[in-house]
Image: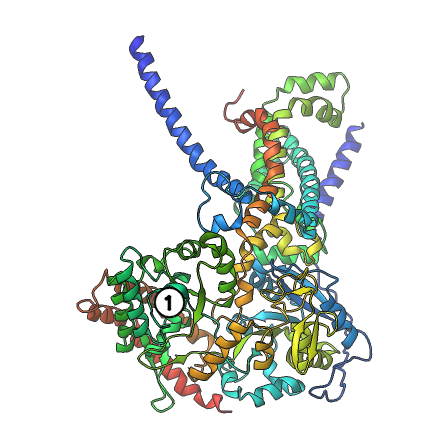
Amino acid sequence: MNKKLKKLIMCTVMVTLCASAFVGCGSKKDTAKTDAKVKDTGTFLANTTFKSDEPLEFNMLYSDAPNYPYQKDWLLFKEITKRTNVTLKLTTSPASDYSQKRSLLISTGDAPLIMPKTYPGQEVPFIASGAILPISDYVSQMPNYMKKVKEWGLEGDLKSLMQKDGKYYVLPGLHEKPVQDYSYIIRTDIFDKYKIKVPTSYDELYEATKTIKAAEPNIIPWTDRYEFQNTLNLAAPTFGAIAGWGYGEGTKYTDSKTDKFVFSPVTSEYKDMLTYFNKLVKEKLLDPQSFTQSEDQAVQKFVNGKSYIISGNSQSITSLTETMNSTIGKDKYKISKILDPAGPKGSVLAGNHLENGIMFSSKAKDNPNFNQMLHFVDWLWYSDEGQELSKWGVEGTTYTKENGVRKLTSDVTFQTLNPTGTKDLRKQYGFSGGVFAYGGSQDLYLSMLSPADVAFQTAVDKTMTILPQAPPVLFSSDEREEANLISKPLTDYVNQMSLKFMVGNQSLDTNWDDYVNQCKTKGSDKLVDMTNKVYQETKSTLNK
Amino acid sequence: MAKQSRQYKVFQVFNVILLLLIVIITLYPFIYVVSQSFSAEKYIIAGKVNLFPKGFNINTYMVIMKEKYFWVGYKNTVLYTVFGTLISLAMSTLLAYPLSKKRLVGKKLLMPFVIFTMFFNGGLIPNYLLIRNLGMRNTIWSIIIPGAISTYNLIIMKSFFEGIPNELEEAAAVDGSSTYRTLISIILPLSMPIMATMTLFYAVGNWNNWFGPFLYFDSKDQFPVTLYLRNIISGAQQSSVSSGSDADELAQIGATIKSATIVLTVLPILCIYPFIQKYFVTGVMIGSVKG
């Protein structure tokens, strides 16, 4: 080829290559400003079915749980569209990384309008950027939600969601009665064998394990799982402290009279709790490995008959039964969940009426169908009809209702109900899934439980006292960061030391004062003072 | 002479023992997973399964084979891997070959650019924004194009090409071969070891890639099987265990299902290795000894 021509071509290519590097630059095209106003569709009344005049589509984030994988053709979605004329356009994310996907979508501005499965607390990082909607401003458009809040007296609980500006940003799931599903599962046959009556308090639990130990010296009767966090969470309120899953930052509200926060881990009540568990470990009644072993290891000991007490919930009974039918032999054992034992402060429960809920993108309020969306969410998640649909399905197809008693149709199975059924309520139809079916009236909640669970929940309701919720402390994001700087290492220290005290590596008699002083050095007093200060300053917002 | 051979024998014994130990440590978890997948669930929970399956059955495999999304995921993974590897190979070769020539104009400028990308990255959000603004979200390009050329692999290829004697090309040029003809007919056939190695590296990378699809795909129909597997293994445990209201969400996927899915996901890659094996050692040693 002609050398000059070649050179010319080379130059052109080089210039084009370099120019293409600048392709990415350029001003953003102004999207046509539609300025569409939000349609006003009038009032939506409670206990009426929401139906849109024209077909609507709302974008929603969906957490795909592996135990009931999402299917496009679920009856749940078909029925929702049939009744409301709304189609949900889902962005699916595997449940394993749901929160990460949600964060990513919000941070990049791609957030769908509706984001369920948001636990109170998870919405906080997104508030400062203005990416999510302060839903409390719009709940007047949600009559079913407001009705339930009023009927069940949840105004006080809602305050715990309040942020510094007096608004809340997540629409929580509501429970008429707090759900307490965790407790201890015991080998009832062993208890019967040694003529021990079912313990109703921690002292009785101690005596029971002592009796078992005396009869079977080689067995450690109680070996626990969840790294003991569940047990601590259950026991702490009965001793007057906070620990385990319910620890938070360690600042415990005293009561409405003294109206302040204290640092629970250095109180005498907390020490009493540690003393109790240390006593059990010392006398070899409680397995010291409970605090660190994996769930599998704990369960193995129980199902192989090497221990007789373990933490669990109603689901645990089902899975343990399945296994123990083969490891020990059907009819050769019996397990049951005992009522949460009472402690020195009585039979109390730190129950919560609120649970995971829905977060909305702040772009929702610019959507012309915003009011419709609010009405739709209100109907599906908070009306009796919507909740029954999500939980039970379609009357006649998946369940029947006679005199107010609901029963799954014979071929439909769900957990322990109708074990011979071939169609799983969740897998085949999409009902009773965690994204749509949660919260609700006590009647609805009990309707799907096994008789044993109903008995348990009724007993909880009758005998246990729900502790009042602590008022929220409305930290600003800077204050919260400051508090976190102290509370994180402090929490680690408290957990470490609590473990050592319970296991016996540190003595509660001689080392306790050192521990208290160390907590103070690590900033426990500062944390409490900060909490109290912010609480007093922001108290007035709570009463708005 | 006798002394030397005894020392050598001692060394050999130690060597073999050490390597056997390493083999056992790395192989055991895998054997454990495989035997779990063939065992009955109850034995696993009871902790009785160690090396060999107990209660041998292939029920779990049957159950998984019936899962629609397992096959959808598998099909997607195969698609992404084959397509992705081909594109990666083509693009890497096209970049490595010119870079290996000393006479490339602007080579001194280009190399630092390329190396820079090995150490620095735009970050998660900027990458996401870029892909989204290019309109590649929810398409196969979002996971194939961005990572198409791995700088590390590129440098290995470049070193290999540098090792091919220039005289060959000159001879080809004398015979009237164009640059492309030289590349395809002369260089590539000589580069089988490096091509095989790169195929393996890229294929494994694409096969295992779950994060890209997780970021850029919104619909379950596009997820690869690794994402399906990840959801099975971690998804059931992710629910917050704060108050017991998620009792039913904690229903664990059986240990057998997890192990069987793992085995099925790993199997194809495992099968490719023996074929690539003989090229592997040569490929990895590339560039260590010049000339």
Give the residue at x 53% y 58%: B252
Residue A50 visible (yes or no): yes
Residue nearest the viewer, comparing A380 with B174: A380
- Name which residue type carries label 1: Asp
Chain containing mark 1? A
As drawn, the residue found furthest toward the right would be: A54
Above or below B187: residue B219: below
Give the residue at x 68% y 52%: B69
Task: Estimate how packed mark 1 is, as few (under 14), some (14 to 19) or many (20 or more) residues with alpha carbons within 10 Å.
Answer: few
Q: Quadrant of the N terminus of chain B?
A: top left
How far from the left and from the top, in percent, is residue A445? 58, 77
As drawn, the residue found furthest toward the top would be: B1
Q: Quadrant of the C terminus of chain B?
A: top right
Above or below A184: residue B112: above
Res A339 → quadrant: bottom left
Above or below A25: residue A395: below
Res B80 → quadrant: top right
Helix, strand or loop at mark 1: helix
Count of numbered tags: 1
How far from the left and from the top, in percent, is residue A280? 27, 65
Residue A249 visible (yes or no): no
Res A410 → quadrant: bottom right
Residue nearest the viewer, comparing A40 with A219: A219
How far from the left and from the top, in percent, is residue A182? 45, 70
Give the residue at x 75% y 71%: A79
**Which residue in the structure is indicated by mark 1?**
A192
How far from the left and from the top, in percent, is residue A64? 63, 61
Residue nearest the viewer, comparing A320 with A437: A320
